[in-house]
Each structure stands twice: as C-alpha cells, then as structure tokens.
C-alpha cells in the first residue's frame, strides 16, 4: 500500500474545484472532504462565515473561525483517514486562509501563517492543485447565482486572493501544481491525474 497522501484543491470561486476534487478522489479511492464545513461543527462555523446578514465580522475573528474549522476538520476527518492508510482529497485547505484572510483581507501573512501553524500542526497538504481560470469565466459563473459574503467582497479583493495563490505556488513549486482549468472538464481531470501520478507516483 502506498503512503497515504493529503491533496488539496485551491482556486477562485467558480473554477471547478469541487468537481475536480470529486473526480480525483474517485480515481484514487480517496476520502473526499472540504474546508470550510467538512464536519458538523465546521458547518455551523461556515454558516456564520457565509451569511450575508453578517456585516460586521472582524477580519481577525474571521481568520480564527476558519482556523477553528480547520483544527476540527484535521482532527476529525483528515488525520484519522491518513492514519487508516486512506488518501485524502480536500476542497480547500490552510492555503485558502493565507490567500483570503492574508493576501485578500490584508492581514499580515506571517501572522495568519503562525495562527494556522498552531491549528494545523504537521498536517499540511502534501500536494496543492491550484486551478486557474480567466477572470471573466469566474465573473460569468458568479453572475448565475446568489452571492455569499465572500463572493460579494469585490474584484480587488479577489484579485489579491488570486495573486496570493500564484505567489505561494511560485515560491513552493514542489508542493504546488498549477492547472489551467478553463478547458473541458474531462481534459482538466486528465491533466490533474497525470500531475498527481508524476508528483506522487499515484
Ligand atoms: P467554497 O465555495 O470553495 O466552499 O469557499 C467558500 C469561501 O470561503 C470562499 O470564498 C473562500 C472562503 N474561505 C476563506 O476565506 N478562508 C478559508 O480558510 C477557507 C477554507 C475558505
């Protein structure tokens, strides 16, 4: 049996992350999970985070809520699965917090990282698949649904988030793989599958 690995998908809203995470998890026979909201406690935290009636959530409090979701998720889902020898595929991870609360909200990225080091311990993703799509694709997909609190944050915020992801990917190329997700779903899945095989031998 191969050593169990923890793979995270990251990217903008509407980039196809959830579909691709599900497909990869199916292909690998992995546990499929997500942040935020991958546990019952996490779903309650997620409800606060996404509620458009919540207009006064402090950025520091927001950061601690996503970190709390993560601590619970790692303890309840990810570590037990890895301990049983299962691979884990997660729709978002600690890197979303660095991108959204650090680069996006403008909190010092080193502080956000330090809080998350405490929440995450040693359980950082072995591989991060960053899906990129042109801005107009994200904008088109967003137009089709009712926006949550993050989606309403505006183009500049989302621009900073995407630059943050790109910067982190460039700084740590052994851990990150960047995949253009603008093509047909099957093609994108095949590219991801090949990358995972090359990087992790799976
Ligand atoms: P989702 O639609 O992919 O589930 O993402 C939900 C939103 O939550 C998305 O706008 C990104 C945001 N988010 C953060 O701001 N910080 C985090 O740590 C995570 C996991 C998500």
Image (cartoon, helix red, strand yellow):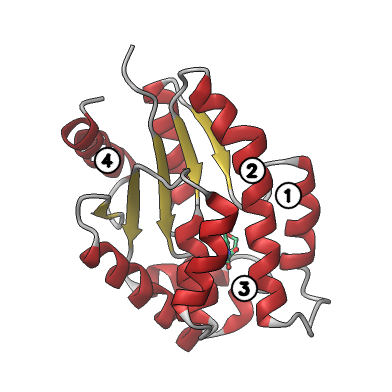
Q: Residue 40 location in percent, x, y?
A: 78, 41
The CB of the residue at mark 3 lies under 8 Å from ligand 1? yes
Q: Residue 64 or 49: which is nearer the viewer?
A: 64
User: Vertically, is 67 above or below 167?
Assistant: above
- CA gap between label 2 and label 3 equals 21 Å
Image quarter hosting the C terminus: top left
Q: Residue at x 81, y 53 (%)?
A: 44
Q: Secondary structure at mark 3?
A: loop
Structural distance between the alpha carbons of marks 1 and 2: 7 Å
Counting residues from the N terminus, which is met first, the one under dot 1 or under dot 2? 1
Question: At which x and y percent is residue 123?
Answer: 47, 43
Q: CA distance from mark 1 to mark 4?
A: 28 Å
The CA distance from mark 3 to mark 4 is: 27 Å
The residue at which mark 1 appears reads as 42
- Is residue 41 found left or right of 90 in the rendered image? right
Q: Residue 67: where, in percent of width, then height?
A: 63, 60
Which mark's residue is nearer the viewer, 1 or 4? 1
Q: Between marks 2 and 4, how big is the CA–CA gap?
A: 24 Å
Q: Which mark is residue 192?
A: 4
Q: Nearer the viewer, residue 60 or 40?
A: 60
Q: Determine the quadrant in which ligand 1 lies.
A: bottom right
Identify the residue under disc 3.
Answer: 150
Q: Which mark is residue 73?
A: 2
Work out whether residue 145 or residue 51 is closer to the camera in this orientation and state it. 51
Residue at point 73% right, 49% down?
42
């Amino acid at each position: 049996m191969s050593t169990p690995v923890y793979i995270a998908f990251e990217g903008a809203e509407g980039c196809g992350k959830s579909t691709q995470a599900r497909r990869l998890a199916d292909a690998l026979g992995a546990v499929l999970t997500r942040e935020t909201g991958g546990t019952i406690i996490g779903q309650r935290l997620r409800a606060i985070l996404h509620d458009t009636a919540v207009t006064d959530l402090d950025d520091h409090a927001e950061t601690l809520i996503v970190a709390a979701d993560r601590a619970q998720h790692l303890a309840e889902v990810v570590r037990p699965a890895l301990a049983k020898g299962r691979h884990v595929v997660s729709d978002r991870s600690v890197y979303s917090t660095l991108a959204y609360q650090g680069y996006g909200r403008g909190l010092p990225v080193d502080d956000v990282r330090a809080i998350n080091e405490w929440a995450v311990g040693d359980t950082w993703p072995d591989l991060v698949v960053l899906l990129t799509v042109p801005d107009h694709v994200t904008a088109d997909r967003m137009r089709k649904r009712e926006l949550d609190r993050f989606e309403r944050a505006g183009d500049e915020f989302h621009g900073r988030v995407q630059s943050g992801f790109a910067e982190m990917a460039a700084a740590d190329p052994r851990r990150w793989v960047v995949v253009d997700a603008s093509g047909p779903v099957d093609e994108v899945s095949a590219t991801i599958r090949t990358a995972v095989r090359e990087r992790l031998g799976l």
